[in-house]
Amino acid sequence: MATKEEKDSVKAVPKKALSRAEKAKKRMKTIYIAFAAVIALVLIFVGLGVGVGYSKDVKPGKKTVIKVYDEEFNAKYVSEVLSYISAQYPAYASYFVNQAVISVETAELLEHKAAELGYTVDEKEVSDIIKTYKFKDIDANRDMIRSSILQTQVEEKIIEPQLGDTAEHRDINLIGVDSKALADYVIEQLNNGAKWNDLAGNSMVSATASDTNIGLLPKALVDIKFGSNGLGDAIFAAQKGNVSLFEDADYQYSTVYEIVRLDSKKEDSAMISTLVFGSKSYAETAAKALKSGVKSFEDFQQYSLGDGKSFEVKITDTTSIYADFVFSTTQPDSYSDVINHNGYSGKGCYWVYVVNDSVDQAYSENDKSTIVANMLNEWMEDLYNSGKDVITEDFDDATTAWIIKQVTG
């Protein structure tokens, strides 16, 4: 199954303990693998058979459902961890089951790793957090809090020393586009004297929709900030003042902007073609040009993520994102307004950039926090992946439903 928040503070609790408690609750949603979003968890959870009921005669609370090394965890324990994780949203506990499972498994793996590293946790610190935030003093809650404290130790003793206090920061202008042809166009315009901000409308990067200057960034933050894989390396290897291009084949995005052309229409179906862009502003510019007749469909085809080929849609399919357009449009070669297409699984981005300046300076508090959190996330992911062979699970539909029921009531 596994593909793996607080009361006001009181003066009696040490400041460091409170900080760790805050991190404990925050990390339950952000540190572990696959903790990206509830929506993602919903998709994962489909395979758990949540809708399956359980018999009142069945008492699976004592059933061992997870084993890590020789440590066994029963369904009751998992339900308590689930309650801890979904404390602010108990009615939606079913969406956090996978998260609870990963939390149990990762906490135990971390306990073993901490022993190897010589890290320990003062149980008084755990008790202080329990008291401050009025958690139930049960093993599951103590284990989750202890896990967060150990993560803080990893952060302080392993992650932060790797980062240091200062680093080279580069001031850059950046435009991310979704086709090589559009990237070549942007570069050509820049080389011919165009201003970066005059071309900002081409960018599919929301942060550069009006101002392409990103400011000073350390290398470690670039890929995190832009969801890229290798852009940071490219920028920090580039010569100052040179307009450069980096092709990021692994870049992924889930929303694009489409313009639909009606090619032909029958009584119950229509043939349409679409232009697909990563930039909303660029799509809006294209739609305006198409509707006014200034440019043709073919003029924009080279910049489209899609192939532009005509395909059939059923007019009766009200779930289609094209439904309103094909239902209300009868004239061939008519164009739709820009349609937001969420859930698009496109890949690939072309980054056009220039390095304006380079400065060695201290990390800002926010930048360092972001980078450290990302590095810790990767460290925890590696820990989990390396420990998969010592983890076994034994869940069934009835047990999973029972676990959820303990939280939702």
Image (tube, rainbow, N blue to C red):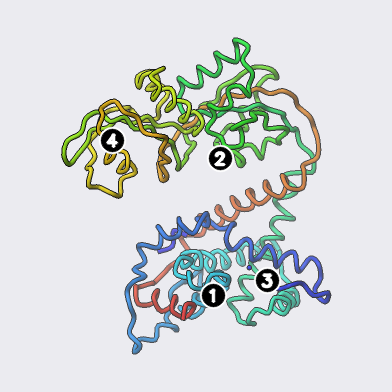
**Residue positioned 65% across, 70% down in the render:** 145
The residue labelled by disc 4 is 329
Q: Which mark is residue 227?
A: 2
Report crowding for label 2: few under 14, some 14 to 19, many 20 or more residues within 10 A (C-alpha).
Answer: some
Q: Nearer the viewer, mark 3 or mark 4?
A: 4
C-alpha distance separating marks 2 and 3: 31 Å
Is the residue 390 above or below the residue 267 in the image? below
Is the residue 234 above or below the residue 51 in the image? above
Q: Which mark is residue 83?
A: 1
Along the viewing direction, whichever of 304 and 113 lies nearer the viewer: 304
| Residue 35 seen in the current view | yes
Q: Secondary structure at mark 4?
A: loop
C-alpha distance separating marks 2 and 4: 38 Å
Could you tell me residue 16's position as x and y percent? 79, 65
C-alpha distance separating marks 3 and 1: 14 Å
Q: Which amino acid type is marked by label 4? A: Thr
The answer to which quarter of the image holds residue 307 is top left
Is the residue 183 above or below the residue 274 in the image? above
C-alpha distance separating marks 2 and 1: 32 Å
Residue at the extreme bottom: 57
Could you tell me residue 252's position as x and y percent? 47, 39
